Amino acid sequence: MQVSNLTQENIIEFVNTQGYGVKGLIDVMKIETLPKQYIHPEQERFSVNKTTSSLSKPKNIPIIDMSNSKTDQLEKEICNAAEKWGFFQIINHGVPIEVLEEVKVATYRFFEQGVEEKGKYLKGKTVSNNVRYGTSFAPEVETALEWKDYLSLFYVSDEEAAALWPSACRSETLNFINSTEVVVKRLLQILMKGLNIDKINDKKESLLMGSKRINLNFYPKCPNPDLTYGVGRHSDVSTLTILLQDDVGGLYVRGLDGKTLIDVPPVKGALVINVGDALQILSNGKYQSVEHWVIANGLKNRVSIPIFVGPLPNDIICPFEEVIKEGEGPIYKQVVYSEYVKNFFKNAHNGKATIDFAKV
């Protein structure tokens, strides 16, 4: 089906308001070419073959074995990865492989449902803003849409989740969140030790992991993958993001040199960890959130499941006192976390532009 005559309003009505998503463009409309609303400017497009061949020495982000009995070495590896890369993968992390596999299956199960069932969780229809089904990132303000559907679940308690989260994925998603709590705490303790903070009090714990949000992301195979993105260039607003990839891949990271483009290949049983803006602010820039994006795939569907750990909405974030060196001032000002997040979501993805909102 040719869709070149569809307007931006038609597309948003179909994929967003009616809830068919980009999956509906493939399954229902049977499109054979990418709608113009998803085509990104040529200078913004990302060619895997072109990029890979242009790198004289391709790099991979660190893979860290959490079972390493040499504690000092493990701590050094984690802190170095947060400083020099902003991204790393962890293996032997203690989350059972069956938990990881089950939440991937549950993600497919949710998105394979009909629009009537998924549509219950659309903006304006969902019974709680903590449960939201949608498409792209910010369709109302994007000049080029992203090739992704998602279910976003803000975690308050197991009881609320049992009452409000979709039954198609509820138990598996909850199990994934709860199973990662120990490793998240361990990572944050190590990262705080790297900032000379040996004890995490209640206030710091709230700033580091007071809130949790999990997304189930679905990327249908795309008729013209070189013309669009699954997710555009951005950094996360979280403290840490814990990402489960499937075996399709498609995640790319920009190196801290601003030039190197790094593929993050799926590693069976691994979790991808990345520093978010909140941790960059709290560490006064020692730990770096980095720009990353997801390419579209022309051959296969893809799912990914990130957990975003961060401050509570009303928390005020600014550099910890312990990281302000004598004679130096903070790089970032005090910001209410909900205001920072609101600024992020009201704009289309644009690299690391959001961090400027917090700069002194």
Image: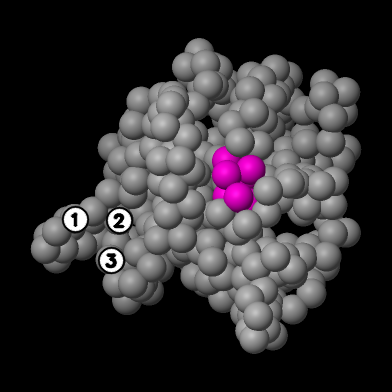
Mark 3 crowdedness (10 Å alpha carbons): few <14, some 14-19, many ≥20:
some
Magenta residues (range): 187-193
Determine if the magenta segment contains residue 323: no
At numbered mark 2, what does the secondary structure look like: helix, strand or loop?
strand
How many angstroms separate mark 3 from mark 2 (CA)? 6 Å
Disc 1 target residue: 58
Badge 1 amino acid? Pro
Residue wearing tag 2: 262
Q: Three-letter amino acid code at disc 3?
A: Thr
Identify the residue shown where x is 54% and y is 21%. 95
Judging by the rendered image, the residue that carries numbered circle 3 is 260
| Residue at (57% x, 44% y) in the render | 190
Q: Would you say 40 lies left or right of 158 here? A: left
Which type of secondary structure does the marked residue at label 3 adopt?
A: loop
Q: Residue at coordinates 29% horizontally, 62% vertically from top-left? A: 261
Q: Assess disc 1: are there few (<14), some (14-19) or many (≥20) residues with their C-alpha within 10 Å of its C-alpha.
A: few
Mark 1 or mark 3: whose residue is earlier in sequence: 1
Tell me residue 160's x, y (percent).
87, 28
Do the CB atoms of the residues marked 1 and 2 lie less than 8 Å apart? yes
Q: Hey, which quadrant is residue 247 in on the image?
A: top left
Residue 192: in magenta span: yes
How is the rendered protein coloured? one colour
Q: What residue type is labelled 2?
A: Ile
